[in-house]
Amino acid sequence: MLTSRKALALAALLASAAPALAQDRVLTFNTNASDPAPRQMFETLAADFMAEHPEIRVEINTFDHEGFKTAIRNFLTADPPDLITWFAGNRMKPFVDAGQLMDISDVWAAEGVGENLASAESSVTFDGKQWGMPYSYYQWGVYYNRDAYEAAGIAEPATDWDGFLANCETFQAAGIDCLTTGSKALWPVAGLFDYLSLRTNGYDWHMQLTNGEIPWTDDSVRAVFAEMGRIAPFITANHAAIDWQDAVALMVQGRAAHYVMGNFAVAAFRDGGMTDDNLGFMSFPTINADIPRAEEAPTETVHIPAGARNPDDAKLFLTYLARANVQTKMNDMLGQLPVNSEASVGDDPFLQAGFEMLSTAEGGIAQFFDRDAPAEMAKAGMEGFQEFLVRPERLDQILDRLERQRQRIYATAQ
């Protein structure tokens, strides 16, 4: 049964679309889904929506993924469509600040929307308003090799940071890298930094840092690097010279025990010969038990441009997009996770583990350092993380450099 407030919100939303019934009801939808699977998914989504709303025609314009990043700045100004794909977090904030995206808080207030998407609400909320509709994400976390545990004589992974580091000493004594990564392309170490940040200072602090509100020379930042310094001796020694796939091989061979990585790596683990019997997954260990558990899950979203010609039907589309059965079907096609907590996932144990972990993350969902921070700051930050893991004695120089970058980059962005 609808609550009074939500029933009114939904009725208002539907009523607002009624005057357009006799008009030519077209929704133009610009997407960056140029790869086969997401392209097919969006075409199916549009067809299913039109079957339910035959009076509305959805016209999809598909852009190359990289070209979309440039095109979006042009069409949001010159010729706004009714719907666009984009990303949650600080990636969308410049468009919100510029008044180019529509406030869709009324869609979120409708029955079955906001409460079922609560895990991702913070990632699309600025100034208390919602600016996008999340439909898919994938988890990051700690993947581990059970055979390496058996070889080192360790029964189970530790869920707290001190216990995890104690196990690292045992792995090191057994000649096994406790943690592996391949940071040649920089981004893999951002996942490690993000989790150390989220577990040390919490989601809100992490968002303030990536939004340029906290000096990199602050003691709270040093606290994150202090934890990174504790794990550094147990990371694969030549990580800066290898790619992320090379580190996968170390896990597959049992020469490394853990890997902080996104769920897309499961296919590489399986291709290397690991099975569901010896590949494990867990949330990143707790560092400060007083901080609500936040997770990392790059989230895909759909938005309504402020200049949309058919905003009422665009809101109906987003209401449809938020439904559990719709997100279940979409993510079955993508091999990713639905955001709606009432949706379901397939039999894959890593998708199931990720769905449970993200759906119960009370602390918030971070997007990833290179989505949460401006591109130039993200690059400088990831260079600093890699340098620190190789040369921890250069911490002061690294933080001073990042602070100078922060003052320049965010001042320019104002």
Image: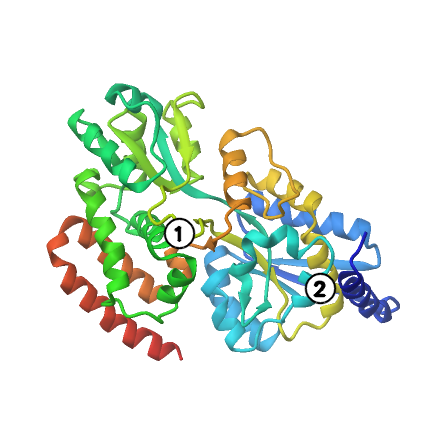
Position of the C terminus by quadrant: bottom left
- Foreground tag (2 vs 1): 1
Task: Identify the amino acid type marked 2.
Answer: Ala
Please name the residue shown 55% across and 52% down the image.
119
* Residue that mark 1 sits on: 290
Q: Residue 69: image x %, image y %?
A: 47, 63
Q: In this view, does 289 lie to the left or right of 406?
A: right
Between 405 and 214, the residue placed more toward the observer is 214
Q: Earlier in the sequence, mark 2 or mark 1?
A: 1
Work out whether 189 lies above or below 5.
Answer: above
Q: Which label belongs to residue 314?
A: 2
Between 236 and 171, the residue placed more toward the observer is 171
Q: Which label belongs to residue 267?
A: none
Q: Residue 297: image x %, image y %?
A: 47, 49
Please name the residue shown 81% across and 55% down the image.
53
Q: Residue 120: image x %, image y %?
A: 55, 54
Task: Identify the amino acid type marked 1.
Answer: Asp
Crowdedness near tag 1: few (<14), some (14–19) or many (≥20) residues, C-alpha within 10 Å: few
Task: Give the colour scheme shown.
Answer: rainbow
Spatial CA distance of label 2 from label 1 is 41 Å
Secondary element at image label 1: loop
